[in-house]
Amino acid sequence: MRRAILIAVLIVVLAGSACIRTKTPLSVHETKTFPTAPGKLVRFDVGSLDVDVRVAPASAITAEVEIDARSSSRGAAHRWVESHSPVFEDSSSALEIRQPSGRTGIVVFGFLNAKARVKLVIPPECRLEVRTSSGDVAVRGDAVLAGPVRVRASSGDVTVTGGLRELIVKTSSGDVVVRHQALTELEADTTSGDVTLESGSQRAIVGTSSGDVRLEQLQGGLSVDTSSGEVAASWAALAPGANVRVHTSSGDVRLRIPEAAPLRGHISTRSGSIHSDFSGTGERREHEISFTAAGDAIEIDVNTSSGDVNVHKHP
């Protein structure tokens, strides 16, 4: 008799659990429009929300909110949607988009699958600043914002495929990727995140702790500071007078410099090896090469503790 009662109770519990798990997710999909103006600041402070910005000619700023939450607890899904529904505060000079303040952690006895994203279309006359914690940030578009874009993220990734010329970004563990459109300036500061630039920049300043740095199609000066991250950089053009500075602790350094570039400065490593195609005007030692080109030259300063250094010419 007791066994029969226990089996019946288990059947009821399992049936109830199955009903809970098939509940329809809660969704929020809404669109808002805001007036634009030359120099108007669009500022995100959205915590864990993903941000997708497209820069395009438009007569207004358009925001689209997409939130979906599925949970074994209907109440938990409601609370998650409420805590992740962005608040918009608009004025003539700024549009502020923020995540509601207060507790955002939701305790669920069961499961919770949820996501939230803000998609924004802004005209190139606007300015853009983004701050997130775990949310990813994407910026794209054929039109280009006139001023620098500032992004601060924690664990979220930052991906740029257009829409800007100047990027100032700081992350903790999030990666930074720039492709498809060349920049005039890149300033990137990460802890463990990687920095990848595929489309080139006229100037680049990068600082990392353990993140790797890979920069391609550069057209001007470079300054990199890393601890254990590797550095790989190549130039499409490099005019005399530019500065190339790379300092690492244990990371390897690989540089590809135009073959006609005259060099002045030095490459040194404490315990690593050095290979350089630029040897005609320099003095070689075991762990150091000095270059003494006269007149206008590329100022080079590469220093690593235990990492290897390879400097190659390319046409």
Image (cartoon, rainbow, N blue to C red):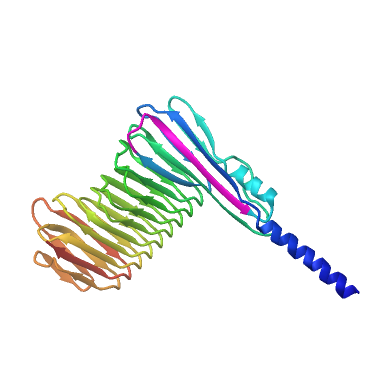
The residue at the point 31 percent across, 69 percent down is 307
The quadrant of the image that shows the C terminus is bottom left
Looking at the image, residue 75 sits to the left or right of residue 48; the answer is right
Q: What segment carries the magenta color?
A: 56-70
- Say whether residue 294 is left or right of residue 139: left
Question: Which one is in front, 151 or 121?
Answer: 121
The answer, for residue 185, to whether it is visible in the render is: yes
The magenta stretch spans residue 252: no
In the rendered image, residue 62 lying in the magenta stretch gets the answer yes
For image coordinates 33% across by 32% down, the residue present is 125
Query: Where does residue 275 sit, x and y in percent of width and height?
Result: 20, 71
Q: Is residue 109 visible?
A: no
In percent of width and height, residue 221 lies at 23, 51
- How far across and down, in percent of the image, does residue 225 sit? 33, 57
Q: Position of residue 217 (x, y in %)?
A: 22, 55
Image quadrant where one finds the N terminus: bottom right
Quadrant in the rendering for residue 126 = top left
Instruction: List the single residue furthest toward the top.
Output: 92
Q: Main secondary structure of the magenta part?
A: strand
Left or right: where 185 falls relative to 111: left
Q: In the image, what residue occupies the spot 44% across and 24% down?
A: 92
User: Which residue corresponds to the image point at 66% horizontal and 58% vertical from the top-left?
Assistant: 21
